Each structure stands twice: as C-alpha cells, then as structure tokens.
Image (cartoon, rainbow, N blue to C red):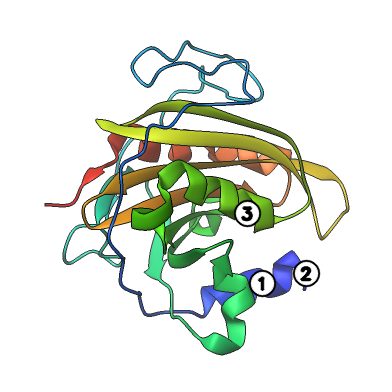
Amino acid sequence: MGRRIRAAVLAALTIGIAAGCGDSAGTPSAGGAASASPGTTPVAPGPPWYDDVAPATAAAKVGPKGTPCELPITFDLPAKWKAKPVVFNPDFAELIQVGGSTMSCEIDAKPAGNIGFIRVWVVDRGAVIGARKGLEEFVAKYGKLTDVQYRDTKAGPLIATEVTFMEESELTGEAKRGRALVVATRMGTMLLTLSGTDTEEFEAMLPAFQLARQTVSVTR
C-alpha cells in the first residue's frame, strides 16, 4: 500500500488506545559511531544524527489530560502541528501495528507546511522484553532499511535509546532518512518516530522532533 494511501487512512483514525505497562530503558548501544552512555552522548553534527539542529519553539503540548492525545508521556510541539489520537481498527492493523508496537497518536506536519508525521507508539510487550528490544523489533518490521544505527541517549530527563536509518520510499523507491526513539515509564514503554516523504522533508521537520525529544517527560 502506498504512503499516500496509508497517510489518508491514518488521518481518518480518531480515537486513542490505551498504553500498557512499562519497563526501563538503558541497555547497551550498538552500531552507531556516536554511541555513548546516556549522560555523555557526544554531539554528532550533520547526518545521521543531526545533533546540531536546534529545537523548534514550543507552542503546544501532547500527552497531558485534556490534550488531543492523552499519553503516559508529554512533550512539546511547534505551532500548527496537529495531533490526533488513533483508532485501533483490526481492518487496518497492518498500518497501526508494527513489530510489536501499536500507534496511539499521529501528529501531522501538513498544517505547518511539511509533509510528514511524528507518531507515538506503545511498545505492547515493553514490560516483558525491555525498551531497547522493543525498538529493535519495531525497526526489524518497519520497512526496507539500511544504515541502521543505535545509540543510548536521554529524552528530556528520561533514559532513551535512539535509532537512525535510511528507508526505501514506497512512493519513489529512493532512500530517505528516518528516526525513532524509545523511553520507558511505569505506565508504558513509548516510541516516537519521525518520517517524511523524503530526506528533505525529514530534515525540515527535525526541529520539531528535537523539541519533542528534549521536552519528553512522564505525564503527571
């Protein structure tokens, strides 16, 4: 199924799903030249990590009670990004369930002028297999990926594991950059992804992902 069809289906999903119980992140990193302990990850400018990209200015929050997506985690969003909870519909399970994770919130960049999404997923067996393993299982089923690199890092005050990769676009067949990170809380193991129609769109949306990454916290 093409990305445009997937995006159209996902945009129609409107009711959130519940998160499961969480587990702790922080298993060793592998595969990334910039890997380090969570508190000492060095700055890696440019591809593949883009640590020199500054976060966008915060204009809204996702996660707390009363926001469109009520989640175990909260984070900031730039202006005009639109969040909506995702319905679990078994007819579209292949779209919203990937490698043991289930999508619970989709944040659309189109109102802000970009074509892409930040998506929030629940790692359904996170309490059993751990956050890092949950991320690895997600990546293994996410698509046709190359240049996959992991590192241990921090997301806000939380220990996180992050992955960067190149993905074969279903629209063009060309490789495009993608990104994901996972954190664990007592209320659920949560995974964030950033994806666009191509690497140019991905790079244009990175400030929003950096903002989300730096402001992640446990929902009170």
Q: CA distance from mark 1 to mark 3?
A: 13 Å
Of labels 2 and 3, earlier in sequence is 2
Of labels 1 and 3, earlier in sequence is 1
Q: CA distance from mark 2 to mark 3?
A: 15 Å
Res. 115 mark? 3
* Amino acid at the residue labelled 1: Arg
Question: Are discs 2 and 1 less than 8 Å apart at CB?
Answer: yes
* Amino acid at the residue labelled 2: Gly
The image position of residue 182, as x and y in percent, is: 43, 44
Q: Quadrant of residue 9?
A: bottom right
The image position of residue 62, as x and y in percent, is: 29, 55
In this figure, which residue is indicated by the disc labeled 2? 2
As drawn, the residue found furthest toward the bottom would be 91
Q: Quadrant of residue 125?
A: bottom left
In this figure, which residue is indicated by the disc labeled 1? 6
Query: Which type of secondary structure does the marked residue at label 3 adopt?
Result: loop
User: Left or right of 140: which side holds 190?
Assistant: left
